[in-house]
Image (tube, grey):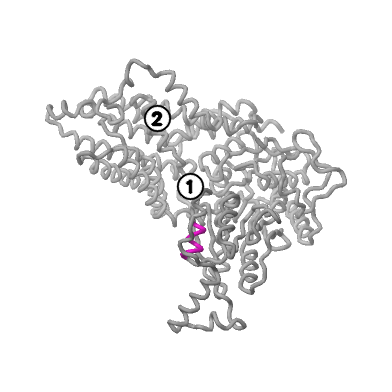
């Protein structure tokens, strides 16, 4: 393929500077490095609509935070499939919009799409949400960032453990990838920290966004006695509304869904991407290298919890707040051995503790004991 | 603790409940399409009409607070889509399948564009009739919460089946669909009949969309249909252009679609991707079983472009 518009960030800045100077427009914006912020165009690519009460909304809320920063222009594109389409979107953001930093936010954008474009444009910076960037293997102008939202699902699990009367909780999941499995396991471990007899039924829908199947899955879980439901799909709206409509409690995910079910919403694990994007953009503007492997949890401000709903008992609130405080100190580990998987094998040995940043958690391929479901 | 779950009974119950809950869009789209195809035209654009109907119904319900006004607005929008398709197709050498695909893309794109601001608001839902009051089990009560549109769909299927056979309008539709020349000889204008049949078909399909966004799953987003409109068009051929067949095929499809989640919920957790393919495997199997090398499809309208 040929570069039809050979332009990188540097030449973009030069042309913009020249253009601005030629038109007599605030040349100080670009030419005086000490006073003003460097102009930077940041591209965001979403797999769905950015007001979906879910994954994309969480990223778009983060993008809205950096829009307010000086010198920053944000370009966004929604509903970009995880196919060669995203490569075209990235190229047009680079060549037509002059983006210098791109955040392709969906899981499937990483390999091969973002990696291919990054090799083609070595002067651009790419940071992917959720991928596992590997030194030496992936281009240095790429990287990945993610939050340890498993902690949030553990806290969800605590409120679920207290709210459940049937001692059976349910999880509507999209695909059995490590991040989803970790959320399922953390949710159950949180509930089991309240009552070790609780089980969690999981249903995989097979796709990130399939409204009818998500509603069917929620109904099937409730028919089998689950009375607290959470999910990991792109937009939890259907799951939250269906579950609350059937009288079950719900724990949210990605963003705050309490307006959809104010009575039944216990709490929710939310992203706080605004903090993460602010950090990346500040570094890019200052000319310091961006991190290639950026991770953080509750205490780092990557993840936050929705306010507790009216269904949370005082007892649950106390335990929730104590655990939350412990997580904020950085000394809390969700995965403390011994933990068996649901086929009886040992996955975390006795005495072993996997802190939130343990790298083996990011390649998790099992469901822990007490989860009813299968990874294939 | 086990008393709240219903164990293996969950599977047949979920299939029954799924048949009732999931089938309604299939019913309306396939009934609409059976009318259009009986008149000798194929409208592949119903996926677009379905999604546009879902968006229109949701938007109008949000703005007016009345789900029924939403359904009416969707019917009107669907009829307009049908009219456009029918009007373009009356010109010579226009291929109705190609126009259908174009109309599908147009409907999807327009729905996404106009529906952007309605993803977040919550619309009032269509009412349902609780027929499960005789049972103490909340699962059965929930499964038998039957939406009014499902009942209307069932009645319409019987009404259409009767009307195709026994009314003058039904006869006109069938004559036009079987032979344009014969229709002209009778003094009928095939283009007008097809225009009206396509408009009515579009209007039906949009009601299916209204069910999706206003009842089950009851939310508007761009992935709401994920191909249900296309499947419903295929169902018409599967049902041999018989409205009651369409209704039964839609039930079968809805029930088969509920199989995957239901099996996982009772602990059959291996191979769910295979179970999700169940409706399509079933369709293939029945089509193969009922096909014949010696005769063409029974009941196919003669003027339909795919059977010529």
On whether residue B193 falls in the magenta region, the answer is: no
Q: Is residue A95 magenta?
A: yes
* Front disc: 2 or 1: 2
- Dot 2 or dot 1, earlier in sequence: 1
Q: Is residue A234 above or below residue A8?
A: above
Q: Can I make out residue B152 in this image?
A: no
Whether callout 2 and callout 1 share a subunit is answered: yes
Mark 1 lies on a secondary structure that is loop
Question: Are there few (<14), some (14-19), or many (20+) residues within 10 Å of tag 1?
Answer: many
- Residue stretch in magenta: A89-96
Q: Is residue B106 left or right of residue A276?
A: left
Residue drawn at (61%, 49%), measured in percent from left and top? A264
Q: Quadrant of the C terminus of chain A?
A: top right
On the image, the x and y values in percent for residue B286 come to 44, 21
Residue B207 is left or right of residue A129, and the answer is left
- The chain letter for the residue carrying disc 2 is B
Is residue A61 shown above or below A352? below
Circle 1 is placed at which residue position? B219
Q: CA distance from mark 2 to mark 1?
A: 25 Å
Q: Is residue B67 left or right of residue A284?
A: left
Residue at figure coordinates x 44%, y 82% from the top left: A22
Q: Which mark is residue B149?
A: none
Residue A64 in the image, given as x and y percentages of width and height:
55, 66
The residue that label 2 is drawn on is: B235
Residue under the image location 15 percent in, 31 percent down? B188
Residue A191, by quadrant, is top right
Q: Nearer the viewer, residue A165 or A5?
A: A5
């Amino acid at each position: 393929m040929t570069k039809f518009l050979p332009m990188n960030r540097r030449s973009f800045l030069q042309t913009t500077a020249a253009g601005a100077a030629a038109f007599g427009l605030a040349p100080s914006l670009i030419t005086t490095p000490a006073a003003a912020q460097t102009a930077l165009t940041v591209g965001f690519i979403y797999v769905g609509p950015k007001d979906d009460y879910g994954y994309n909304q969480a990223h778009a809320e983060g993008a809205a935070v950096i829009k307010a920063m000086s010198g920053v222009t944000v370009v966004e594109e929604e509903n970009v499939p995880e196919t060669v389409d995203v490569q075209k979107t990235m190229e047009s953001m680079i060549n037509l919009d002059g983006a210098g930093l791109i955040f392709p936010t969906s899981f499937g954008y990483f390999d091969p799409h973002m990696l291919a474009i990054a090799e083609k444009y070595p002067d651009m910076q790419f940071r992917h949400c959720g991928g596992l960037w590997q030194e030496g293997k992936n281009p240095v102008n790429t990287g990945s960032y993610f939050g340890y939202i498993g902690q949030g699902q553990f806290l969800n699990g605590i409120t679920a453990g207290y709210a459940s009367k049937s001692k059976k909780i349910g999880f509507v999941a999209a695909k059995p990838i490590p991040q989803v499995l970790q959320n399922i396991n953390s949710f159950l471990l949180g509930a089991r920290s309240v009552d070790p007899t609780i089980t969690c039924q999981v249903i995989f829908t097979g796709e990130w966004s399939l409204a009818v199947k998500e509603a069917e899955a929620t109904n099937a879980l409730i028919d089998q006695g689950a009375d607290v439901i959470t999910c990991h799909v792109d937009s939890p709206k259907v799951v939250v509304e269906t579950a609350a409509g059937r009288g079950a409690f719900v724990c949210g995910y990605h963003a705050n869904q309490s307006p959809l079910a104010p009575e039944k919403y216990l709490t929710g694990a939310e992203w706080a991407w605004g903090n993460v994007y602010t950090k990346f953009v500040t570094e890019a503007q200052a000319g310091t290298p961006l991190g290639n492997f950026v991770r953080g949890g509750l205490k780092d401000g990557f993840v936050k919890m929705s306010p507790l709903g009216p269904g949370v008992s005082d007892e649950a609130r106390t335990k929730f707040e104590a655990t939350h405080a412990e997580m904020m100190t950085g000394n809390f580990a969700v995965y403390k051995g011994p933990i068996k998987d649901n086929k009886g094998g040992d996955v975390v040995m006795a005495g072993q503790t996997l802190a939130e940043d343990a790298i083996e958690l990011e390649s998790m391929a099992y469901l822990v004991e007490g989860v009813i479901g299968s990874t294939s | 603790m086990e008393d709240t779950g219903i164990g293996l009974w969950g599977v047949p119950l979920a299939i029954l409940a799924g048949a009732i809950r999931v089938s309604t869009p299939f019913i309306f789209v396939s009934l609409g399409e059976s009318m259009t195809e009986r008149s000798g035209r194929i409208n592949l654009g119903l996926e677009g009409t379905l999604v546009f109907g879902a968006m229109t119904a949701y938007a109008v319900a949000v703005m007016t607070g009345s789900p029924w006004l939403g359904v009416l607005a969707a019917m009107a929008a669907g009829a307009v889509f049908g009219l456009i398709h029918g009007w373009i197709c009356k010109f010579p050498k226009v291929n109705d399948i190609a126009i259908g695909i174009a109309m599908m893309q147009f409907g999807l794109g327009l729905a996404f564009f106009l529906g952007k601001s309605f993803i977040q608001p919550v619309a009032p839902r269509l009412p349902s009739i609780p027929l499960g009051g005789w049972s103490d089990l909340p699962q059965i009560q929930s499964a038998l919460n039957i939406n009014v549109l499902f009942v209307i769909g069932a009645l319409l299927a019987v009404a259409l089946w009767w009307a195709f056979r026994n009314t003058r309008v039904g006869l006109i539709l069938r004559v036009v669909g079987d032979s344009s020349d014969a229709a002209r000889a009778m003094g009928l204008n095939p283009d007008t009949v097809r225009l009206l049949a396509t408009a009515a078909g579009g209007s039906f399909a949009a009601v299916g969309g209204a069910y999706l966004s206003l009842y089950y799953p009851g939310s508007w987003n761009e992935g709401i249909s994920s191909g249900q409109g296309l499947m419903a068009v295929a169902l018409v051929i599967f049902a041999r252009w018989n409205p009651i067949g369409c209704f039964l095929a839609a039930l079968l499809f809805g029930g088969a679609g509920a199989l995957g989640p239901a099996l996982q919920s009772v602990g059959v957790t291996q191979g769910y991707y295979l179970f999700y393919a169940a409706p399509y495997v079933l369709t293939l199997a029945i089509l193969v079983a009922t096909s014949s090398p010696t005769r063409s499809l029974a009941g196919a309208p003669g003027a339909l472009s795919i059977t010529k």
